[in-house]
Amino acid sequence: MERKTNLIDRISDFLAVISAFFLFIIIFLILLNISLMAVANKSILITAEYSGYMFAAFVMFGLAYTFKEKAHIRITFLVNRLPFQIKKFLYILSLIIAGVISFFIAYHAGIMVYKAYVYKMRADTVAQTLLWIPQSCLPIGFFVLGLQIIAEILKEFR
């Protein structure tokens, strides 16, 4: 069981590295666009569109790692006043609910990506990006978040 949770942790870590990469690309693209506008009065027409896509990937690929590191906002002022056993039960129950919701979103996001792929949907922009490419970060991010939630449940029973 520990091998499985360690594997899930490594997948989350890997996606966090990819997430950070997208953030650096966003910064580079925006700085390059600003520089081109200042120096040559020209613009990279895809800056806003691709920055948006990469920001979505940045967020989605960082979800599981953020959860693993317990960095999501937690409101615990009521739960902290409960006895330990009830607190643990509610924590595990909330993890199960969060996992179900995460896999539900991943499933339906996967359907959305599949339909965008089948119908060859494109963005209504200059780049006419195939939408399944940037959309694919949604099912991946939520699926790995669901896996990370399962890993947290397994860690609670150790």
Image (tube, rainbow, N blue to C red):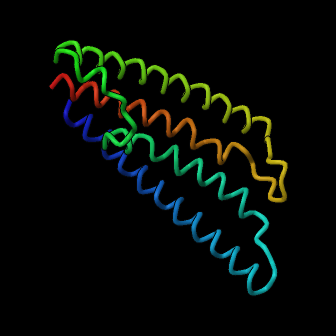
Tell which residue pokes out farthest to the bottom in this image: 39
Quadrant showing the C terminus = top left
* Total marks placed: 0
Picture coordinates of residue 154 (x, y %)? 24, 26
- Residue at 42% across, 30% down: 146
- Residue at 72% across, 59% down: 48
Picture coordinates of residue 14 (x, y %)? 39, 51
Give above or below for 108 relative to 45: above
- Residue at 78% across, 73% down: 43
Q: Which quarter of the picture shows residue 83?
A: top left
Q: Along the line of sight, which residue is nearer the eye, 71 or 147? A: 71
Q: In the picture provided, is 12 more to the left or to the right than 23? A: left
Give above or below for 91 relative to 114: above
Q: Which quarter of the picture shows residue 127?
A: bottom right
Picture coordinates of residue 142 (x, y %)? 50, 34
Give above or below for 74 relative to 27: above
Q: Which quarter of the picture shows residue 137?
A: top right
